[in-house]
Structures are given as structure tokens and as C-alpha cells.
Amino acid sequence: MKLSKFGEKLTAKTGILELMEDLGNALHGKQKMLMLGGGNPARIPEVETVWRNRMEKILKNKDEYERMLGLYTTPQGDDEFMKAIALLFNNKYGWNITKENVCVLGGSQMTFFFLFNMIAGKFSNGNHKKILLPLVPEYIGYADQGIEGGIFTANKPILEYLDDHTFKYFIDFKSLSVTSNIAAICVSRPTNPTGNVVTDEEVQKLYKLAKQNNIPLIKDNAYGIPFPGIIFTKSTPFWDENIIYVMSLSKLGLPSTRTSIVIAKPEVVKNLSSINAIVHLSTATVGQHLVTPLIQSGEILHISQKTIKPFYEKKAKSAIEYFHKQMNNSSIPYYLHKAEGALFLWLWCKDLPITSYQFYQRLKKQHVLVVPGEYFFPGFDESWKHTRECIRITYSQDKAIVLEGLKSIANELKSVYK
Ligand SMILES: Cc1ncc(COP(=O)(O)O)c(C=O)c1O
């Protein structure tokens, strides 16, 4: 079949396709695979019970189930859900938003596709604009989203060693410049793949930079506060009309509901709703319907803080301790990024004798799936060997799987450096 430019772009072999195929095969395939690669949230029994109870209540309540499944919403989202979201943020953080600031879409992956292509790429006056990623590594899922191609530009971070085997990235503001071809600044917080949490101070600086240049700051809050709240350091959410705040229900344990929430100025909400009408017609209701009462009551904050956050924090801590133990005082110059949130460990193997892609392939042969680091540098054109020295390891799966996987990674690492 002859493909259009759009067809060619979206059917090419991409990192995200390989990742999702790996994930699907590992979770549903016959061969044993230790899945330390994807971003699937963990199954947390207390949280699963909450969603099960909600569904049972819906099933028992007159025709609520039929209404949930049988009605299209507007392309902006479900009225009750959007009002509940606005109220939650106003009550909890003193934001001053209304339903007109809220848009509900089919997951944040789709949201970013809409957003990036809406504001970056080719303009009718011939200009070409880009999204600035102020710090890479950054989320693999952004990489191939530009229909135009070349819509990202990215800044090299500062690396700070925190101890013998721990480091953290910071934004290098000295080298960060916003030129006239930048359409927006975008950052995930916590960051996928590293678990980094850009500090409140860094966010303020980014916000000022965006405002001075009259462009939006896009904050990808897939793991952030107030929900799902997988963030282990101090972080204060703030919003004004210059910020596009993107959230998702996925990491609340509801990835299959494909539901995301955008909080932005009404003009952005209107534009996104228009795109949604063309591409998706309406917004999926199941997630919104399941979650609305918990947003109205504030229980969603409680679940995030008291159950989800401690669950992941404990898992991260035990995975890190176990990995160091497996490395057993080895002289290999390996470093884990400080785990400040999200579901991942980011392993940097300094002066790795092979590329991280080759390392990934070696691990795959050992039935361990990780994600090679080079995919996480969208828009970064400099030659920097660090980009080929890292892998992303997910610690959200069952403990036995994670520990067995980490053991194999440590053993393989030792054999690579031999
Ligand atoms: C940082 C980040 N943004 C966005 C997404 C997309 O999430 P979803 O489409 O499930 O809402 C993910 C998924 O893992 C992510 O890690």
C-alpha cells in the first residue's frame, strides 16, 4: 500500500511501538518475560477494590450503568466530572478555575499529540515552531508525535553526583534559551524515564521564562500531584493561564479507561475540544464516571497520598537496595538516578562498553525487558555518549519479578564490563 507522508510518519518503526509490543508480548505472551520495561501501573489491591466497589455500585443503581455506556459526551468531556475537577483544585490549592478551563481527552498520549501538533510544526506564514524540552532524558512517548517531524529541541542537563552510586539531573538554565521559533516549553514532573522531580524553584524559573516569551509552559503530570501522587519530594502545584496542566487517570490503576484531563485557559480548551470532535468525536465516559464521586468527596487525594504514594515509594526503596546489593561493591561506575517519583529506576552505566540498545538486546535474551536509554532524548542532536549509557527499569510489577530482573541486570552488567 502506498502511504501518505502522514501514513509513513505514523507507521515507522519507533521506540514507543517497540516498547508497547514488548509490553503486550510480555503481559500476554506464552514465553516467560520479566517485564521491567513498560509503564504499566502496579496492581494495588486496595485501589483495585475501590474501582471494583464503584463499578458494583454503578451496576446496582437504577440505569446508571446504561447511562455510563450509552451516551456520548460533548468533545470537551462530561459536565459533572469537569465541574468536580475545577472544584477540587479550587478547594485544595486555591486555583480560580471553572469548567471552561477543563477538557477531558482520551489519555495523555493522545492529548500531547493534539497539543504538540496544534502549536508546533509548520505555520501558514511559513514559520516552523518547536517544543522546547528543557531537560532530557524526557518521555519516550513524545518523540514521534510531530506530524511534521523535527518539532522538538532539547537541552542537555547538569548532572550532579549525590553519592558513590546516585546522581540527579538539573536544568541547565545557563544554556537554555527560548528563541522566536519556540512554541512552548514542556516538562514531565515526575519525569519518565528518570524519576526526577524538577524542583519548585526550577518550575518557577521555567514559568517566568515561558511568560516572558509569551509561550505556554506544558506540565505533564501523569505521575504527579494531586493524583496519582507518585512523587516522593516536595512539590507544589500551581497554575495560571500561561500553564497547560495535563493529568491522567492511567496511573490510578485505570489505564484502559484512556482518560486524561487538561487544565488550561478557555481558548486552549476550546481548540483541544475541536480537535477531539474531529479525531475522536466524544470523550470516553467510563473513567470519568467511575472517578467523579471520589473527586467530589476528595477521597481521590486520600487514596493517592495514603495508598498509592507509599506503595510506590516502598517499592522503589526496596528495588534500589536490592540492586546495590546485587552489584556487591563492584568497581563498575554505575549510578541510579535519585528516585523522586514515577515508576522507574534510571540506571546510568558510565563508559558502558556497548550501547544501551545492545545491552537491552542482551537482557532480552535473558528474558528481561527494559527500555534502552537512547529513546529518551527527543530533539537532542548533540553527540553525547551519556545518551547511550542508560536504561530505564520499571519497578511497578510484582516484587518477585522485579528482584529476579534486577539480579539478571546486575549479572549482565558485570559480564559486559569484564
Ligand atoms: C510522562 C508520561 N506522559 C504521558 C503518558 C501517557 O499516559 P496515558 O496516555 O496513559 O494517559 C505517560 C505514560 O506512561 C507518561 O509516562
Image: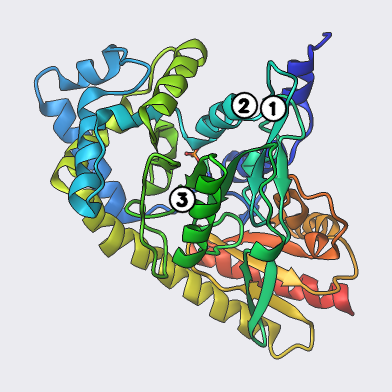
In the rendering, which numbered label is found on residue 117? Answer: 2
- Does residue 98 appear anywhere in the picture? yes
Would you name the residue on which mark 1 appears? 121
Judged by depth in the image, the label closer to the viewer, 2 or 3, is: 2
Q: Residue 133's spot in the image, x, y percent?
A: 64, 49
Q: Residue 407's spot in the image, x, y percent?
A: 66, 73
Are the two marked residues, 1 and 2, in contact with CB atoms closer than 8 angstroms? yes
Element type where label 1 sits in the image: strand
Element type where label 2 sits in the image: helix
Are the two marked residues, 2 and 3, in contact with CB atoms closer than 8 angstroms? no
Would you name the residue on which mark 3 appears? 41
- Does residue 199 appear anywhere in the picture? no
Distance of mark 2 from mark 3, alpha carbons?
27 Å
Q: Earlier in the sequence, mark 1 or mark 3?
A: 3
Q: Amino acid at mark 2?
A: Asn
Distance of mark 1 from mark 2, alpha carbons?
6 Å
At x 69% / y 73%, what residue is drawn? 159
Q: Residue 366's spot in the image, x, y percent?
A: 76, 60
Q: Is residue 156 left or right of residue 251?
A: right
Judged by depth in the image, the label closer to the viewer, 1 or 3, is: 1
At x 71% / y 18%, what residue is drawn? 125
Q: Under 8 Å from ligand 1: the CB of mark 1? A: no
Q: How would you rate the neighbour count of disc 1 (Cα within 10 Å): few for under 14, some for 14-19, many for 20 or more?
A: many
Looking at this rendering, what residue extends furthest in the left direction?
Answer: 62
Query: Where is the C terminus found, in terms of image quarters?
Result: bottom right
Q: Amino acid at mark 1?
A: Gly
Between residue 235 and residue 11, name the one nearer to us.
235
Q: Earlier in the sequence, mark 2 or mark 3?
A: 3
